[in-house]
Image (spheres, grey):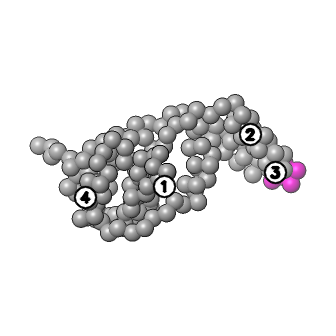
C-alpha cells in the first residue's frame, strides 16, 4: 500500500521565456566570432566545441522545460521517479526573491555526485510547511546562488 506524501506539487526547473530573433542573432554572432578566433589560432578542436555548444544552447533555449512532480515522503524527496533520501542530504535552505516576484526556491546540497545541488521551485505549495518539514530532518545552512546559476539567469533560462 502506497503512503500518502506529506507534501506534493508540480513545477518546472525554470520559467520558459521564448527567445526572440535578437537572442539567436546574438548567439550566432558570438559563436561566429569565437569560431573565427579558434580557426585563426589553429585550434580546430575548440572550433568544433564552439559549434556544438552553440547548437546545444540554441536547442535548449527553444524547448520548454518538462513539468516535474515533487513529493515529500517519510524517507526523502521524490522528483518524478528519482528518490533523494534525507540521509544523503547535507543541508538545505529556502531562497526567496527580494522583490517577491518569484516563488521561493528550495535549495538542497546532497552527497550525490550526479546531482550535488538541487534547486526546486516552491510554487503552489505551503513553503513554510515544507521549510518546517525539512528543518526536522536536514540541517539548515545558508545557500547562495552559484556562478553557474547567475550566468544561466543572465542568459534567460
Q: Disc 3 marks which residue?
A: 38
Residue 80 visible in this rendered orientation of the protein: no
Q: Classify mark 2: residues with Cα within 10 Å, few (<14), some (14-19) or many (20+).
A: few
Q: Earlier in the sequence, mark 3 or mark 4?
A: 3
Q: Disc 1 marks which residue?
A: 98
Q: Is residue 60 above or below residue 112?
A: above
User: How far apart are the two marked residues, 1 and 4, measured between alpha carbons?
Assistant: 23 Å
Q: Secondary structure at mark 3?
A: helix
Position of 36 compared to 6: left or right?
A: right
Instruction: Report the mark closest to the observer, 3 or 2.
Output: 2
Where's residue 81, x and y in %? 32, 44
Residue 96 visible in this rendered orientation of the protein: yes
Image disc number at residue 133:
4
User: Which residue is painted at 15% across and 46% down in the image?
Assistant: 3
Position of 135 compared to 14: left or right?
A: left
First to last magenta residue range: 38-43
Specify the quadrant of the image occupied by residue 128: bottom left
Q: Earlier in the sequence, mark 3 or mark 1?
A: 3
Q: Earlier in the sequence, mark 2 or mark 4?
A: 2
Q: Secondary structure at mark 4?
A: helix
User: How far apart are the two marked residues, 3 and 2, measured between alpha carbons?
Assistant: 18 Å
Where's residue 155, x and y in %? 63, 46
Image disc number at residue 26:
2
User: How far apart are the two marked residues, 2 and 1, measured between alpha carbons?
Assistant: 30 Å
Amino acid at each position: 500500500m502506497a503512503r500518502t506524501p506529506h507534501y506534493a506539487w508540480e513545477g518546472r526547473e525554470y520559467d520558459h521565456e521564448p527567445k526572440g530573433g535578437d537572442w539567436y542573432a546574438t548567439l550566432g554572432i558570438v559563436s561566429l566570432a569565437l569560431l573565427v578566433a579558434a580557426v585563426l589560432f589553429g585550434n580546430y578542436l575548440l572550433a568544433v566545441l564552439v559549434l556544438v555548444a552553440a547548437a546545444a544552447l540554441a536547442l535548449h533555449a527553444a524547448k520548454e522545460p518538462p513539468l516535474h512532480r515533487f513529493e515529500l515522503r517519510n524517507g526523502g524527496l521524490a522528483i518524478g521517479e528519482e528518490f533523494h533520501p534525507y540521509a544523503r542530504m547535507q543541508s538545505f535552505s529556502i531562497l526567496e526573491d527580494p522583490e517577491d516576484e518569484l516563488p521561493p526556491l528550495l535549495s538542497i546540497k546532497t552527497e550525490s555526485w550526479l546531482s550535488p545541488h538541487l534547486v526546486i521551485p516552491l510554487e503552489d505549495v505551503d513553503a513554510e510547511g515544507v521549510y518546517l518539514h525539512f528543518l526536522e530532518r536536514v540541517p539548515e545552512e545558508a545557500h547562495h546562488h552559484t556562478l553557474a546559476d547567475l550566468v544561466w539567469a543572465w542568459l534567460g533560462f
